[in-house]
Amino acid sequence: MYERFVTQRVEEVLTDTPVVLIVGPRRAGKTTLVRKMGEVGRRYITLDDQTVLEAARTDPTGFIRGLDLAIIDEIQRAPDLLLAIKKSVDEDYRPGRFLLTGSANVLTLPRVADSLAGRMETIRMLPLAQAEIEGRAPTFLEQLFDGKLPKCQSPILGEDLVRLVLRGGYPEVISRESERRRQDWARAYLTSILTRDLRDIADLEKLTELPKFVRLLAEHAGQLVNYSQFGAAINVTHKTGQRYVGLLEQVFLVTTLQPWFTNALKRIVKTPKLHFLDSGLLAAVRGMTIERVKADRGAFGAMLENFVFAEVMKLMSASELRLNPYHFRDGQMREVDIVLERDDGMIVGIEVKASATVKSGDFGGLRALADACGDRFACGVVLYDSADVVPFGDRFVAAPLSCLWA
């Protein structure tokens, strides 16, 4: 069993907060984590059990009455339970009473959005990070804000890096030996998400068109969002296309990365970018295999950017730093793939390259970001497919992609 980054934080929050909600995609490892905690006296209840689900939906208050030190798995299937939990917690505010998991972000549902404000802490758990797979405690983010990066002892390069990116981080994918079997699992998983989980949170028109819609999003992964174009692909409006993207965000299939900007820059792109939260699922949707990447390396760049973005999101869950992620693009089309802003306003920029060489021109976006930030700029790094850390002037460095888990 892999040691997960969020374990210590969950244990800590349970000591001072009545309700803890772990949210993240289905099959990312949430149930494994909470069942382990159930071994110390917590009652485990799953709403994937149809009889239990019916009882929870029929009488939420009666279902919660008498529960204490309880784990409720897949809470999004009966969101009205959150209202009953609120009532129970208001009567007994002891910490650690309820540990919940959700494979959809139930806090975006209007009827429950504010029901547990001040009573619950939410922790996001994504599929396995490479550092979790290798059993390492990464310091990548902390090193960036300190303006330096560690050397990578055993960098993963070339075809091995491609294989790692196309695999992604789902535990069941990692356990499968062949690429074909990994992609078979990913396709079955996507079918389940699109036909089951989305029905738990919304009534959808054109449900049969969703696979086509997701394929279109996959072709635009790492690019600026265009809701009109997305909607037109399945003959729905801009507004409906935006709603569908929002629902896919709720089930943690994709996310939109907001732009970073400052009033000091008059011309700047303020459109979000689209990312998949697992590069293995993205590869399955796009039909990307190792052989196809060999034949067309250009198609690997967007895959790699999505992989790095997801890895950074996972590292943020393990870090004591308080960070917000963005992307950057100015009016001259100079861009930075990932911008991280610390709560004190300090900024780092991360650019991703699929090649084994880096040139000074590859730092154009990072230099534009540094100029916009001034003294707030801590470091800019270009991550690339190599083993060498190479300085490119003050506060700029090219570094191996493996630094993400060093």
Image: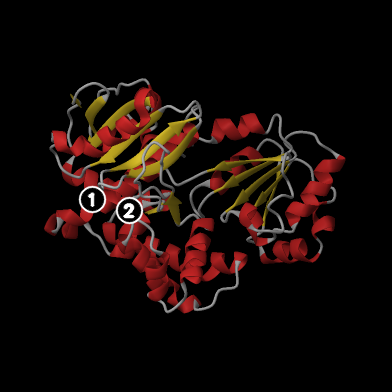
Determine crowd level at label 1: few under 14, some 14-19, many 20+ residues with C-alpha closer than 10 A.
Answer: some
What residue is at 14 percent from the left and 39 percent from the top? 356
Query: Residue 250 falls in which quadrant of the image?
Result: bottom right
The C terminus - image quarter: top left
Find out whether the residues at labels 1 and 2 contact each other: C-beta distance under 8 Å.
yes
Residue where numbered disc 1 is placed: 301
Residue 256 place in picture, x, y as percent: 44, 53
Which residue: 70% across, 58% down?
79
Image height of 174 relative to 39, above or below = below
Q: Give the amino acid at mark 2.
A: Gly
Residue linked to disc 2: 222
Camera-nearest residue between 387 and 322: 322
- Answer with left or right where residue 329 lies relative to residue 40: left
Quarter holding residue 218: bottom left
In front of the other: label 1 or label 2? 2
Q: What percent of the width, then of the height, locates residue 287?
A: 27, 64
Which is nearer the eye, 54 or 271? 271
Task: Check disc 1 and give the amino acid type.
Answer: Gly
**Would residue 85 appear left or right of 27 to someone viewing this image?**
right
Q: Pick whichever of labels 1 and 2 is earlier in the sequence.
A: 2
Instruction: Name the residue rendered at 32%, 21% in the picture.
Output: 147
Q: Is residue 136 visible?
A: no
Q: Name the residue nearer the viewer: 4 or 293.
A: 293
The residues bearing labels 1 and 2 have C-alpha atoms spaced at a distance of 9 Å
